[in-house]
Image (cartoon, grey):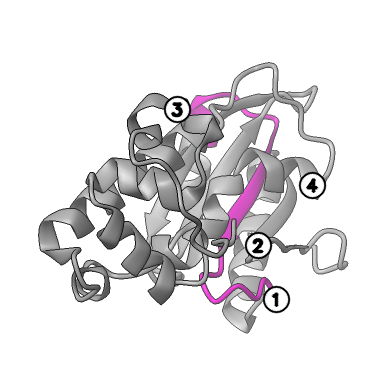
Amino acid sequence: MSFNAWRSFDPARLYKAREKDLSSEELLARIFRNVEAARALAEVFSDLHDMSRASPERLSKVPGIGPARAEQFLACIELGKRLNCKRPSSKHVISSPEDVAELLSDMKDLEQEEFRVILLNTKNHVIRVFTVSVGTLNASLVHPREVLKPAISSCAASIILVHNHPSGDPSPSEEDIELTTRISQACELIGIILLDHVIIGDDRFYSLREEGTI
């Protein structure tokens, strides 16, 4: 959501109006209880997404913010992400890469790579989603046994691999393809189907299944 040009408003409105009726700038002013601090943020950052990705150090340097308000803002952002994160349940059915991207939509905003696995039953209902690794993706962190052990214990019929590219470009690297191949071979040995490996970027995704890689 982009910031609009700052407009005049009744200060009392900040504490009387419902949150959904306030602009982004007004919500920031309510959080900080300081109009000038909110205005300074709106002048430095292009939108809330840009602001949410800023480091605490960068936020702290904005006039009127400082370390305490920077931490306060980032805590609000984290709560919003957790609230927005959909809890998978047996009601979730995965039938396409779009379903995967929607289910794990929180991954597009992560600042570092995260590798998750979706476990499915024979009807493609989600059993659960678990995280294998957080950080730079490599073969030592994402070993087939770390992927398949939970799948076996949960009696999953199939799995979908998912990880994000914080750069925003979901195109697979050579290591992504090599890792997918290794896990696919392990799945064949134990009779679990690897349905897809979906890479999530900035409002885009890449399906290795649809592109013919697996």
Q: Which residue is mark 2?
A: 199
Residue 39 falls left or right of residue 167: left
Using the image, tell me which numbered label, if any, was put on residue 98. 4
In terms of secondary structure, where does tag 1 sit?
A: loop
| Amino acid type indicated by mark 2 | Ile
- Of labels 4 and 3, the one closer to you: 3
The residue that appears at 65% across and 17% down in the rendered structure is 90
Q: Are marks 2 and 1 in contact (CB under 8 Å)?
A: yes
Could you tell me residue 180's position as x and y percent?
64, 64
The residue that appears at 76% across and 40% down in the rendered structure is 99
The residue stretch that appears in magenta: 151-171
Magenta span includes 44: no
Could you tell me residue 126's position as x and y percent?
65, 27
Mark 3, other Cα within 10 Å: few <14 / some 14–19 / many ≥20: few
- Of labels 2 and 4, the one closer to you: 4
| Amino acid type indicated by mark 4 | Glu
Q: Quadrant of the N terminus?
A: bottom right
Q: CA distance from mark 4 to mark 3?
A: 37 Å
Q: Which residue is mark 1?
A: 171
- Of labels 3 and 2, the one closer to you: 3
Whichever of callouts 2 and 1 sits on the residue coming sooner in the sequence is 1
Using the image, tell me which numbered label, if any, was put on residue 17. 3
Whichever of callouts 3 and 2 sits on the residue coming sooner in the sequence is 3
